[in-house]
Amino acid sequence: MPPWLLILITLLVVTLVINPSERDFSWYRTLKRPDWISMQPWIPAAWFVINVSFYFSALSYWRKSGDWRWMGAYGALLLLLRLDHLVICRLHRLTAGLPFWLLSWLATLVLALIVLPASPLAAGLLLPVLVWTPVEALITLQMVGLNRKEHRSGRGPSDRRPAGSRRL
């Protein structure tokens, strides 16, 4: 199997398998979002750009190095980038994604610095991840504030009963 196809299949399988189920994601859709996010329809487009950039970064580095160990590093980074939404939606806790964003941002930075000498193109193609990860974390932190009462109760935004727990 050619490396370009293996990298593409890995990207697609991880993306499809780690997406939250419709049941889990329905909770997330009910949450309030910051007013400044008028670009919500553009978020899937941003993820498309991230996935394409990620794919071509891995492919570019593979063509320069031919080292499968670094493809494993790309795979681990892909898991970190994708696990946040699954964990958030399964646990119904927005703050559960923060460690994943921090780790994925740091891992992306380290990987970009490692691949830079061999392939500046591969390192540059990781820039969308380095830009988007803090933006996504900022959006989520603001959502935590907007949905604080709903998180404590474990119920939806339309439930106005007093919260039974202080857990975020």
Image (cartoon, rainbow, N blue to C red):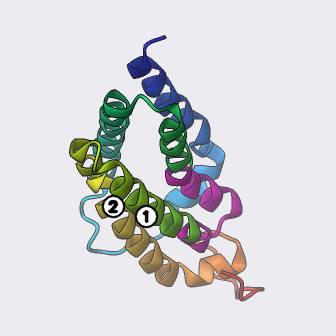
Residue appearing at x 28%, y 51% in the figure:
116
Mark 1 highlights which residue?
105
Q: Secondary structure at mark 1?
A: helix
- Asked whether residue 14 is in view, the answer is yes
Residue appearing at x 38%, y 21% in the figure:
4
**Nearer to us in this view, 79 or 86:** 79
Looking at the rendered structure, the number of numbered marks drawn on it comes to: 2
Q: In the image, which disc is placed on residue 130?
A: 2
**Which amino acid type corresponds to the residue marked 2 in the rendered image?**
Leu
Marks 2 and 1: in contact by CB < 8 Å? yes
User: Which residues are drawn in magenta?
Assistant: 80-98
Q: CA distance from mark 1 to mark 2?
A: 6 Å
List x then y, in percent, for residue 12. Answer: 48, 29
Q: Few, some or many C-alpha atoms within 10 Å of disc 2 (few <14, some 14-19, many ≥20)?
A: some
**Nearer to us in this view, 15 or 65:** 65
**Nearer to us in this view, 30 or 74:** 74
